[in-house]
Amino acid sequence: MKPRIAIFSLTSCEGCSLAILELEDQLLALLGGVEIVNFREGMTERAWDIDVGFVDGAVSTPQDEEEIRKLREHCRTLVAIGACACLGGVNTLKHQQPPLEYREYVYGAGAKWFPTTSARPLSAVVKVDYELPGCPMVKEEFLHFVKCALTGKQFRLPADPVCTECKKLGNLCRYEKGELCMGPLTRAGCRAICPAYGSVCEGCRGLLGADAVAAAREVFPARYGVPFDRIADRLRLYGAYQDDGENAISGVLQPSR
């Protein structure tokens, strides 16, 4: 039997799910090796015997938490796709405001009818087997993951920063242009798409880890005159949950004392 895969969405724009549909002809070829049994964006049928479940979006409501626990039960392998599912994503920006304030801003007088919780990555609630980060998820990385799963090969995310991809492409470093870029701290795998098209890296693929942050504390202020507080503030755009004390790299975004 073909492996049975499914794609689900929690609180998100569902851009990562749509990225799968954007594979087009490659997706059709992929269907020769797998069976998609549950995918709201692409089909009406539903089945719950799932070998690999892909989930985008953050856990940001009580319903999200209930849903991800249900999905964990039905999926032999659970894969978080995109910055929201892997890091909490832009949903975590609400942590910087009082709950009543952001709820009333979004829902107005009817805010009480829409319960919410803190925005969290999937891994804060259930066991996640793999992560495919990015905003949106890199669709080619999704394809590579599925191919690895089909052939029994081990899948690994790149262990280098986005800067390595910039160098290979011959991009002028954004720091040399006086801009604040998260490339030195962010996991590669996106082909440095933002710097390649004239923008800075915003860190949507998550921090490489504490070692990279420690280097940034030393290098950025000394070489570029950038206080580390500014770096930490920028990283919170996609990964505010990374420094709330509950993540495996908790505290690395906090200013040195």
Image: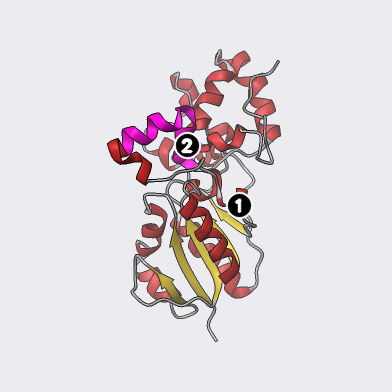
Which mark, by number, is residue 52?
none
Mark before the other along the chain sequence, 1 or 2: 1
Mark 2 residue crowding within 10 angstroms, few (<14) / some (14–19) / many (20+): few
Which residue is rendered at x = 43% and y = 45% of the image? 115
Residue with the most extreme left position: 109
Which residue is rendered at x = 57% and y = 42% of the image? 187
Which residue is tagged 1? 125
Residue 190 appears in the picture as rendered: no
Closer to viewer: mark 1 or mark 2: 1
Which quarter of the image is occupied by the N terminus? Answer: bottom right
As drawn, 256 above or below 6 = above
Kind of residue sitting beneath label 1: Val
Q: Main secondary structure of the magenta part?
A: helix
**Image location of residue 28, percent across then percent down:** 38, 74
Residue 18 appears in the picture as rendered: yes
Q: What element carries label 2?
A: loop
**Bounds of the magenta span?**
89-106
**Image location of residue 226, percent across then percent down:** 55, 16
As drawn, 199 above or below 13 = above
Assess whether residue 92 is covered by the magenta stretch.
Answer: yes
